[in-house]
Amino acid sequence: MTMKLNQDGYKYAQELIERGKVVSDERDAWSEHQPAAEQENEFIDSHGYEAFGKWHLGIDTDAGEDTKARYTFPYGDFKNLHRCAILSAESRAAQYKHEDIKRAAGHLHDMLEKATARTR
């Protein structure tokens, strides 16, 4: 597996935070909030793999281009970015030593904290 940062997904995540399209949920909520496989398939059928990829911070360059396996480190539900997903991505990227993804998730985490502080 060769993992790299998905620049399009990273930019899109930043845009979502700037637009306030964020769910400020608890750290361990991602397992409950992440889209189910059926929801992913419906999204791909409606919008395609390129749009699906924008909801992920990682790309597995060994996986085929038009496959779900190509996209890793999801961060949202196809409507909003989820804080819990960013925290999960940051932790997992560090665990597996995907440094560029870890840095990107850390930057998004910082952006979320600043955005939250502004709305208090």
Image (cartoon, grey):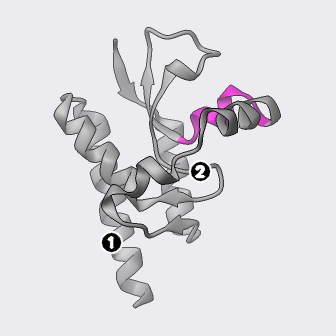
Left or right side of 50 for 96 = left
Q: Is residue 48 magenta?
A: yes
For residue 77, the mark is 2
Q: Amino acid at mark 2?
A: Asp
Label 2 crowd (10 A; few <14 / some 14-19 / many >=20) = some
Image coords of residue 107 (percent x, y)? 31, 55
The stretch of residues the image draws in magenta is 47-55
Q: CA distance from mark 1 to mark 2?
A: 20 Å
Q: Which residue is mark 1?
A: 113
For residue 89, the mark is none
- Which image quadrant: the N terminus? top left
Q: Is residue 115 magenta?
A: no
Which is closer to the viewer, label 1 or label 2? 2
The reply to whether discs 1 and 2 touch (Cβ–Cβ < 8 Å) is: no
Image coords of residue 4 (percent x, y)? 36, 25
Q: Secondary structure at mark 2?
A: loop
Q: Amino acid at mark 1?
A: Glu
